[in-house]
Image (tube, grey):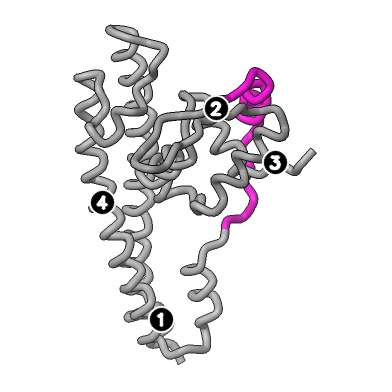
């Protein structure tokens, strides 16, 4: 069987919510995963085809949008079992690539001013990310009270439920969304704090007055 990467399970997880088209999945990636997981548009359809070939998903004709008809993909029982098995396993703590840390590590022979400039730029990026995540948090939080997603993601509301049960399901998913966003906020804040500390130490190194 084709090797199953994490993108495989990310898309399978989306299908466990409700049947989706590749376009739906791309929209969901953009609004929910972009700050902690990367899936390119070019990965989505090949992965969906592999899921169908493996018997983990089925495909059916979906709604037409303009001149284009979008196929819907639906998780199968085997797909749900595979997803549940993966979800129950411990988190993979393999080392993540971090370009900032790599450039910092390799910059020991560069001029200190260049390294400080690198860190200042990184701090600016993290400040912008934190601001965007705070906006997303504030836009998402009202669904905890209303039980309804914001207009741009109302299509995520579970079709198999209605009334009070649907509202409760939306509140539960909203809480998960908020916890994910909150983690992103705290990571950005930790990186901003690190940037301030690093700049301070580089501008005033503890060995400056030692012979």
Read off the magenta span: 74-96
Instruction: Look at discs 2 and 4 and give the one toward the viewer.
Output: 2
Return the disc, 3 or 1, that comes first in the chain's sequence: 3
Which element is circle 1 on?
helix
Disc 2 residue crowd, few under 14, some 14–19, many 20+, Cα 10 Å: few
Q: Secondary structure at mark 2?
A: strand
Mark earlier in primary sequence (2, 4): 2
Q: Is residue 183 visible?
A: no
Residue 27: horizontal and vertical position, in percent?
38, 43
Q: Can you give x and y, in whole percent of width and height, for residue 124 in the image?
A: 28, 67
The residue closer to the viewer here, 85 or 104, is 85
Displayed quadrant of residue 32: top left
- Numbered disc in front, either 4 or 1: 4
Q: Secondary structure at mark 3?
A: loop
Q: Nearer the viewer, mark 4 or mark 3?
A: 3
Residue beneath disc 2: 60
Q: CA distance from mark 2 to mark 1?
A: 54 Å
| Classed neighbour count for the residue bearing mark 4: other residues with Cα under 10 Å, few (<14), some (14–19), many (≥20) | few
Q: Nearer the viewer, residue 162 or 133?
A: 162
**Dot 1: few (<14), some (14–19), or many (≥20) neighbours within 10 Å?**
some
Query: What residue is shown with label 3?
Result: 4
């Amino acid at each position: 069987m084709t090797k199953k990467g994490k993108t495989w399970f990310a898309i399978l997880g989306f299908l466990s919510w409700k049947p989706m088209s590749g376009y739906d999945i791309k929209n969901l990636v953009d609004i929910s995963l972009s700050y902690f997981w990367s899936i390119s548009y070019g990965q989505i359809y090949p992965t969906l085809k592999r899921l169908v070939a493996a018997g983990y998903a089925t495909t059916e004709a979906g709604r037409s949008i303009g001149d284009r008809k979008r196929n819907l993909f639906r998780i199968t029982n085997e797909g749900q079992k595979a997803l549940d098995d993966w979800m129950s396993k411990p988190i993979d703590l393999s080392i993540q690539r971090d370009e900032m840390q790599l450039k910092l590590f390799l910059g020991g022979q560069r001029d200190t001013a260049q390294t400080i400039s690198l860190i200042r730029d990184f701090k600016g990026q993290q400040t912008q990310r934190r601001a965007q995540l705070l906006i997303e948090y504030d836009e998402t939080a009202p669904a905890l009270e209303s039980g309804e997603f914001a207009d741009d993601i109302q299509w995520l509301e579970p079709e198999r439920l209605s009334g009070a049960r649907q509202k409760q399901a939306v509140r539960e998913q909203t809480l998960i969304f908020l916890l994910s966003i909150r983690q992103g906020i705290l990571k950005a804040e930790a990186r901003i704090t690190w940037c301030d500390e690093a700049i301070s130490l580089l501008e005033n190194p503890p060995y400056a007055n030692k012979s």
